[in-house]
Image: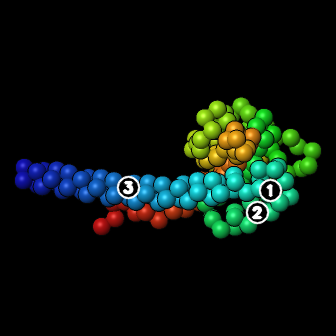
Amino acid sequence: SLAVYWTAWEFRHDRDRVERQAQGAAVRVAAQVADIVGDVQGMLAVLARVPAVRAGDRAEAERLFREVLATSPYLENFAAFARDGTLFATTTPIASRVRILVQDRAWFQAVVHTGRPVAGGFLVSRISGKPVAVLGQPILDELGRVQGVVGAGLHLAAFSQEVAPIQIGAS
């Protein structure tokens, strides 16, 4: 009976230790993700004010997007859309005749309707075909009206690489 009690105590003790480790790891990962999201939202706020992006200058916007994209392993893509949801600039190469529309995406609609930045959910990008989490920022005209949206797709595989090394339950 003492052996059964001891085994049960060890089990509960190990379970509690693993739960504390998992909670600690979750808190660390959540803080990292929040920092990354904050950084990307800051990038989008700046990009939305760049004259080339506001003017719909595809070549210059794409050059700038590629330059900024190279600074973060967490970004899959930057893209800019007209108010009607038509893509006008992206870092992902696409066939010139392909017309990509996002007017039906909830994140895009929320940015256009509220005029505020939005963190969208997880989806498969229509541009890259890869799973991403989307952040959107309004592109405003001189009067503060939404004239378009600049968005960033966060590369979910990069986040999984951050989480993969976390060992839970190891002594």
Mark on residue 52? 1
Q: Are marks 2 and 1 in contact (CB under 8 Å)?
A: yes
Rendered location of residue 124, percent (x, y): 68, 43
Label 2 CA crowd tier, 10 Å (few <14, some 14–19, many 20+): some
Kindly tell me whether residue 113 is visible in this rendering. Answer: yes
Rendered location of residue 110, percent (x, y): 62, 35
Q: Considering depth in this image, is 3 or 137 the residue closer to the camera?
A: 137
Kindly tell me whether residue 157 is visible in this rendering. Answer: no
Rendered location of residue 76, percent (x, y): 68, 56
Q: Quadrant location of residue 145?
A: top right
Label 3 CA crowd tier, 10 Å (few <14, some 14–19, many 20+): few
Q: Quadrant location of residue 167?
A: bottom left
Q: Amino acid at mark 2?
A: Leu
Label 1 CA crowd tier, 10 Å (few <14, some 14–19, many 20+): some
Q: CA distance from mark 3 to mark 1?
A: 39 Å
The residue to which callout 2 is attached is 64
Q: Amino acid at mark 3?
A: Val
